Amino acid sequence: MKKGMLAVLTLVLATRPAAAAGPESAADPISDIRYDVSFDSETAARREIHVEMSFDVVDGSEVALSLPAWTPGSYELDNFARNVNDVWAREDGEEIRWDEQDYDTWRVYPTGAGRVTLAFDYTADQLDNGNAWSQPDFAFFNGTNLFLFPEDGDLGFHSEVVIHTEDGWRVTTGLTVGSAPREFIADSYHELVDMPTFVGRFDVDSLQIDGAWYRLATYPEGTMAGRAREVIWDQIQKMMPPMEDVFDVTPWDEYTTFMVFTPSFGGGAALEHSTSHLGIYNLNFRLSPTLASITAHEIFHGWNVKRLRPADMWPYDYGRAMPTPLLWISEGITDYYADLAMVRGGIESVDDFYGDTEAKITHANSTPPVALEDASVSTWIGPRDGTSSIYYDKGSLAGLMLDILIRDATNNTRSLDDVMKTMYERDYMQGRGFTNEEWWATVSEVAGGRPFRDFYDKYVDGREPYPWDRILPLVGLTLVTHTQKTPRIGISMRETDDGVSIAGVQPGSSAARAGVREGDLLISVAGIDGKDANFGLEFRAKLGGEDEGAPYDIVVERGGQQVTLPAALSFDTSTISVIQPDLTAGETALRVRNGLLTGTTGS
Ligand SMILES: [Zn+2]
């Protein structure tokens, strides 16, 4: 998952089945499982997707079926059952009894051997890449939203999916194509729910990169056309080789990038799957480097987290939260490799790479100190102190430090790439998740035996500031930090019919101490008209050079009266970090820097 300015994971894989699922035996409580999904202009008008799950039963034993609580990669409990309505159950066409075992589990009571169907409508109105969303001519959904699983069976079951829609509409999904149009198959439940689907009117095309097929499906039609489409395709072609070089293997024959563009989405956020990802973006992401960076991040997840995955999430359990202290590896290291793919692939310049790194350092410095492991675990509850997604940027910086330290320890003959490749082969390829101990043992081994216990204690389990003064010189770089003071009033405003209204006052701020209240109409601040479109800019320009505590007036209208509130100026302090090449850097540092930026090792 990746979200915010830009924002971004599953499982079992076609390339490496741990054990082939055999044909269902008579002992299976249910068999021959099929899901019929209907979305057309009629259901779209109700913003609903109709789902029917049908299966054979051998006797009248009750069957319990559940919907997932979350979509892997989206580390929050969404309880998709809350979007379910109009449930019914039939056996061979006759209504049968059903009830709820708990809030996301339904029980059906067959009357004997036969074919049972449990059906419901799913409200598809959540603009969230782990959920389902519809428009009059389009819908996307995740399998976790719609597909029930047997509560007491194993998840290795084979199933068939049939999508029913308008004749002229398209269906695109990563699921394996079946024997009929719009019929798909999945070899396990994990595979079934790991394949987001587009239904309706949208654009799709594909091309081959290094022997694998890449599809690009974009909604609405025409939004990613012409130059915007050419550019993202060019960027995808450039980002793939440096990512493939890390692992020496591309674990898919087909990969699908789904993109939804809508002005009602403020930023950009995407969610990874084994052979696809689904992103939702504001229209201003078209032609931005951020769109390419998110795309690289999500595709890298195809290796790191969808396949190479912390043991805490192996296998996925859809019914409960699965916190892991290693999420900084799955997300932060992935984001480091997205930055590397951008620079190694030539999509961005070296200076852009430094700029991305500077922004991450600035973000980490402006966030309360938090251990990477703690931030990884607590993302499930969305902490409100600013640390909820810091494991992306801070984890990415930890990846950069590890890469530098490994290359430095081995005279640039080994790198973090070797750690990723070794872990992938030792854990994922052996059909298991990895542990913290395995990670650090591999890091140390790749670094020629260099110990990392101290690094782990301080920067991963601990909260110490990162030691850029010691690390960056190893790659011939220095970090220059500037302190920036910005005058701040401490109010948020909203436009109303009556004028500009105070929507909120930050406790302890200059405005709070002056007595500004929520609901006041803002007339002026330091003589600057509250309705001025450049109000904030002008305030900072006018008072930026003053001293802390300098007097200024805030004029508001309250209860029909103008009130002048004397205020004392206060400043926010932030630090800006700039990475600069060290012109006196030695040969080894330059070799390590060049190796890191180009993805090469050797002396
Ligand atoms: Zn991610």
Image: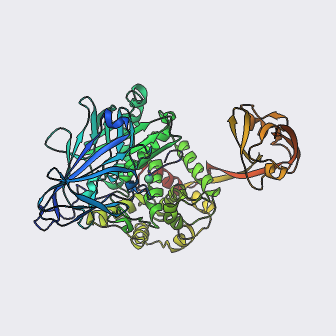
Q: Closest to the observer: 168 or 114?
A: 114
Q: Is residue 158 left or right of residue 351?
A: left
Quarter containing the C terminus: bottom left
Can residue 530 be seen here? yes
Compared with residue 461, is residue 552 higher up or lower down, i.e. above or below?
above
Q: Closest to the observer: 72 or 546?
A: 72
Q: Position of residue 485 (x, y in %)?
A: 76, 49
Q: Position of residue 480 (x, y in %)?
A: 67, 52
Q: Is residue 297 left or right of residue 493?
A: left
Q: Quadrant of residue 98?
A: bottom left
Can residue 408 be seen here? no
Q: Residue at x 37, y 58 (%)?
A: 305
Q: Is residue 513 left or right of residue 474?
A: right
Q: Closest to the observer: 120 or 562?
A: 120
Compared with residue 228, is residue 352 higher up or lower down, i.e. above or below?
below
Q: Residue at x 17, y 38 (%)?
A: 181
Compared with residue 442, is residue 55 higher up or lower down, i.e. above or below?
above
Q: Position of residue 541 (x, y in %)?
A: 78, 37
Compared with residue 400, is residue 265 higher up or lower down, i.e. above or below?
above
Toward the top, the furthest residue is 226
Q: Position of residue 326 (x, y in %)?
A: 45, 65
